[in-house]
Image (spheres, rainbow, N blue to C red):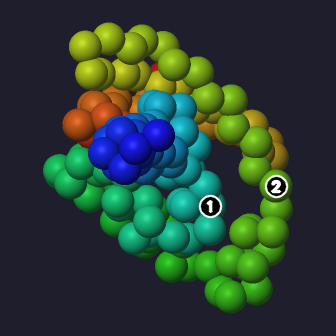
Amino acid sequence: MNFIKLKALFIFALAICLQFGCKNNEQSTPENTVSNYLEAIDKFGFDAAKKLTIENENTINTLENIKKFSGKFDEAQKSKYISERKTYNIIVKSKSDGKAIVAATNNQGMFISSTLFELVNKNGIWLIGNIKSEE
């Protein structure tokens, strides 16, 4: 194989790696985005959760409300909460044209909470644009 063919093959392989190997797997699907958002919230990682959202009044207020509520926890309560296993049932209710609606249900303790996430795909990355309690 001559040098020019080898160089062309290397450039082609590099282009493939850059195109498909560098995608952010955390946000490659609506389910991954919601799962990672919930995991960040459950670890009090509000900056990490914020990166998974489109900044708007809804997402900012939601995070601020969660921060205020969690601010009432002392360090021992936070540590206990983080160490407890959380189980979410995450279901894509609809997905089309770069938009998705995902429901996340959590049955922790004596109550069931269900949240709807509206997501938008921006350049191959799914971001949360709206969060609301499901009724």
What's the residue at 68%, 77% (across, down)?
78
**Mark 2: which amino acid?**
Arg
Q: Position of residue 38 (x, y in %)?
A: 56, 50
Is 124 positioned to the left or the right of 1 in the image? Answer: left
Residue 44: % across, % down: 55, 71
| Quadrant of the image occupied by residue 122 | top left
Q: Nearer the viewer, residue 124 or 78?
A: 124
Q: Is residue 70 visible?
A: yes
Residue appearing at x 27%, y 31% in the figure: 120
Q: Amino acid at mark 1?
A: Asp
Q: Confirm whether residue 130 shows in the render.
A: no
Q: Residue at x 17, y 50 (%)?
A: 56
- What residue did someone put label 2 on? 85
Near-viewer residue (9 or 101): 9
Instruction: Identify whether 29 is placed above or below 76.
Output: above
Judging by the rendered image, the residue that carries numbered circle 1 is 42
**Decide: marks 2, 1 in contact (CB < 8 A)?**
no
